[in-house]
Every structure is written in C-alpha cells, then in structure tokens.
Image (cartoon, rainbow, N blue to C red):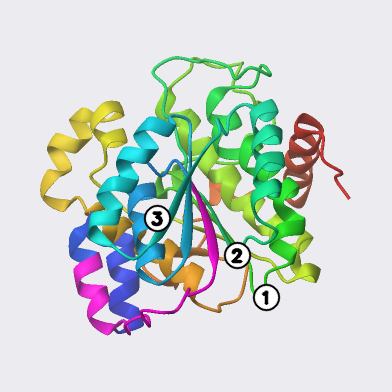
Amino acid sequence: MHPVLDTLLDRTVALGYGRPGFLLRQRSWSTMPPDALSGRTALVTGANSGIGKAVATGLAMLGASVTLVVRDPERGRAAVADMAAAVPDADFDVLRCDISDLTDVHRFAHQLAQRTERVDVLVHNAGVMPPARTESPQGHEICLATHVLGPLLATDLLAPALARSAAARVIFVSSGGMYTQPLRVDDIEYRSAPYRGATAYARTKRMQVVLAQLLSARYAAQGTAVHSMHPGWVDTPGVADSLPRFRRLAAPLLRTPAEGADTAVWLAATDVAPGGFWHDRRPRPEHYLRRTRESDTARETLWQYCASATGIDPR
C-alpha cells in the first residue's frame, strides 16, 4: 500500500482502526512462513478470550509452544480446547497468574523458572476497564496494576529467561485510545479527579507505550526487543462488556480478534527495530496532539514510580 494512503487511513481513525483499514493494508503484506516460530516458547497474558486468545493461536500456527497466562485456569483450558481444534499439532500450556497482583507475579515467575529456562516471546495482553475505581491487593489502581506494574515486574523477573533466547521479543498490546491522553505523572494512581474507567484505561495504555521504549533501552544489551502496538477496533468480550454502546454503533467496522492480533503475532516473528509503536505492521506516531507530548522528566518520573512500586532496580 502506498504510504500516503496508509497515513490517510490512519488519520481517519474509523477506517484505519476498523476492519476496512486492515483488509486494504493486508493486500500488500507478505505471508509469514508457517515455521517462523518453530522451537520457540511464548507466553501470552489474558489469553483465554478475545485478542489474547487470537495472539496465542497465531503464535501456535507459526510453530511456537504457547503458554496461556490467565487468572482462571479453567477458562484457560477451555480456550486451549478451542485452539487445539484449530491448530491440532500445537503445544499449549496453561499457568495461573493474576498480573495485577504483584505477589502472584512473583509466584508465577518462580513457578515458570522451574518449568523452562528460556522464554522467546512475552505478550502483555491482559486488560481491564472497570466501571469504578478499584485497587489491586497492593493498593494500586487496577488499570495501572494490570497494564503497567504487573507487566513491568513480570518482564523484569523473566529477563534472565528472555536473555537466553537468541532473539527475544516483549510486546505490549496497547490501544489507539492512548492518543487521547497525556502522561499524567501528577496523578499516576488516578486519585484526584472523578474516575472514569475508559480514561484510566487510556492513561495506562499511554504509559505502556512509554514503558516499552524505556524497557527497550534497558534490555537492549541482552538482545531483548520490546515493542508496543495497538490492534485497532476489535470485537471482543471486553468491548461488549465495557463499551456496549460503542460496540453497537461501530459494529460494521469492528475487526475480528485474529485481525486485531495480527501485528502482535507479526512482531513476534519478525526482526524489526525495537522500541516502536506499531499498528497494522507499520510504525505509527506516538502522538497526534501537541497536548499529549511528555517531557523526559515526566518519563523519568513514571519510571521511578513504577520501579519503586514493583521493587525493581531502577538502574
């Protein structure tokens, strides 16, 4: 696709983020080899439905051994039964972890270390959009805990296993909604204003994009590439539950979970420069609005807060 047309699609939002943009862009994509991830291990959080389930399926179709990291193992096993029917020869596993609970993240990382020495792909997909402000067991706002703190701690704890990979990838499934929000380091825990779940979601998705760049620099020396991406507008159970009105209005434009998952799967199987923000297999701007641009000081403030909250070494 011509870059100008691709950019125009992106600026229209509805077409670019919706199914029409995906269908137009995919015409120019090359097919990924069916063994692109053969012999590699992958972890996908929040993988029992929606985009996470589609990412796990897509990775398995390329030959990866995939572990579903989920809060409810029973639902995870049901998802595996579905995926095994689609990819009969795939190797799936299910491990329990509430990514919003930092204590449980430590337990999970220890358990995983007993089962495998190497992790090649880590996809942070688990997400929430609560109707009211709630907190994690450690007292953090639940979107922050689920989208930022838990993934940061999990990545840090799994860094040695990622370092043993020849080409490890860490991928944050962010959201185009992050374009609407600046980096609010003055209210990281969302305490000082009337709470809106959609705003909390978008704020923490902005944080993910910043965090992906910071982690990209942190792990560059060990060969671990870190990316963030957004899947566009996707018809998922989460959208149906949290944004029913949007789902009704946008129904003709919504992508399938597999279409939303495509770029995450592609990033896992493709060697591209780390640290970018991706959509439909192309790097995208991190900002469209002047008011959302953050300073280096704001980035450092976010990093120091998150490092302190998770107990990791900020250096």
Q: Residue under label 3, please give it.
A: 56
The three-letter code of the residue at mark 1 reads Ala
Q: How many marks?
A: 3
Q: Is residue 268 left or right of residue 24?
A: right
The quarter of the rendered structure image containing the N terminus is bottom left
Q: Position of residue 84 (x, y in %)?
A: 29, 55
Name the element at disc 1. loop
Viewer-closest of 162 and 248: 162
Specify start and end residues of the magenta stretch as a single range.
22-44
Q: Earlier in the sequence, mark 3 or mark 2?
A: 3
Indicate the position of residue 149 as horizontal and vertical percent values: 66, 36
The picture quadrant where one finds residue 22 is bottom left
Earlier sequence position, callout 1 versus callout 3: 3
Disc 3 residue type (three-letter): Ala
Q: Residue at x 22, y 54 (%)?
A: 255
The answer, for residue 226, to whether it is visible in the render is yes
Find the distance from the CA under tag 3 to the CA under tag 2.
14 Å
Residue pointed to by mark 2: 120
User: Looking at the picture, does residue 197 appear above or below residue 26?
Assistant: above
The numbered dot on residue 48 is none
- Lower sequence index among marks 1 and 2: 2
Mark 3 neighbour class, 10 Å CA radius: few under 14, some 14 to 19, many 20 or more: many
SS at mark 3 in the image: helix
The x and y percentages for residue 103 are: 70, 26
Name the residue beneath numbered marker 1: 166
At label 2, counting other C-alpha atoms closer than 10 Å, the crowd grade (few under 14, some 14-19, many 20 or more) is many
Q: Is residue 279 visible?
A: no
Answer few, some or many: residues within 10 Å of disc 1's Cα (few below 14, many 20 plus, some between 14 and 19). Answer: some
Amino acid type indicated by mark 2: Asp
